[in-house]
Image (spheres, rainbow, N blue to C red):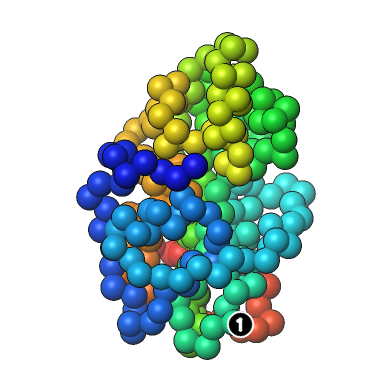
Amino acid sequence: MAISDDLPLMRGLSGAPIPDSMPLVLASGSPRRAQLLRAAGYEFTIDPASDDAECGVCSRETAPELVARYAYRKAESVVRRHARAMILAADTVASCGGQILGKPHNEEHAAEMLRTLSGRRHDVFTGVCLWSSGESRCIVDVVRTELQMESLSETMIREYLDTLLWEGKAGAFGFQDGNDWIEIVGGGSESNVVGLPMERLKELLENFHSVAETIDARQSETPTSNE
C-alpha cells in the first residue's frame, strides 16, 4: 500500500540538487522510498539492489552498524551498472532492548514483533548510502528516531495483521499506516521511520563533495559520515 499523499510527512518536503547534475538512481524497490523522493521533487530511476545485499548478520553487530553495512552493500550491488550516476541506497530496522527487528518473514513473525514492541520505547534506524559512480566516492550515514508504542491487545494486533500493512516493513508496522498507537518521541524524523530520512538526505547531497570518501574497489570497511 502506498503512502497517502495527505499525510503531513508528505507535505513540505524539499530536495537538493544532485551533485554535478548526475542522474539519481534509487537502489531499492520500496514504493515508500520512491514516493518520499517524488514528494520532495527528485527525478530518479529505480534499479533495485540484489537480494543477497541483505544477507548475513555479524555477531555483536549493532542495529546502526547493520543498516550502514546493508545500505553500502545495496549501493555496491548497483553502482557498476551505471557509469555516471548518484546511487542512493537505504536500509531500515527497528531495535528494542538490543533486539534487531527487520522485516517479518510471515504473519506469526509479525505478531511476535508487535508483542515485543507493545508498550515499549524503541528505535528505528535507517542507513543511507550515496555513491557517485563517476567519481568512485561514497558516504554512509545512519539516522535514529525514537518511538513509543502503546500497549497492544491481542485484538488490536490481529486487526492490524489482517490489513496486511505489516508486510515488508521493519518491526512489522508502518508509521504511515494511520495507527494511533505509535508516536515519535522528541521530534525525530517521520520520514526516517518510513524508510528514508529526507532531511538528512538533503544535507548529505548538499555537502557530498566535502564529506564523501574515495572508494577503493578492494575496500571492505563501510565509509561513514564524520559530520
At 70% across and 61% down in the image, what residue appears? 51
At 29% across and 40% down in the image, what residue appears? 6
Q: Element at badge 1? A: loop
Answer with the quarter of the image where residue 67 lies.
bottom right
Whether residue 13 is situated above or below residue 24 in the rendered picture: above
Front residue of 71/15: it is 15
Residue 53 pos. (x, y %): 68, 63
Check the picture and name the quadrant holding the C terminus: bottom left
At 25% across and 46% down in the image, what residue appears? 11
Residue 116 pos. (x, y %): 64, 24
Circle 1 Cα neighbour tier, 10 Å, few/some/many (<14 / 14–19 / ≥20): few
Residue 69 pos. (x, y %): 62, 60
Q: Is residue 15 visible?
A: yes
Q: Which residue is mark 1?
A: 80
Front residue of 220/173: it is 173
Whether residue 173 is situated above or below residue 45 in the rendered picture: above
Front residue of 71/98: it is 71
Horizontal relation, residue 54 to residue 128: left or right: right
Whether residue 110 is situated above or below residue 15 in the rendered picture: above
Q: Is residue 117 visible?
A: no
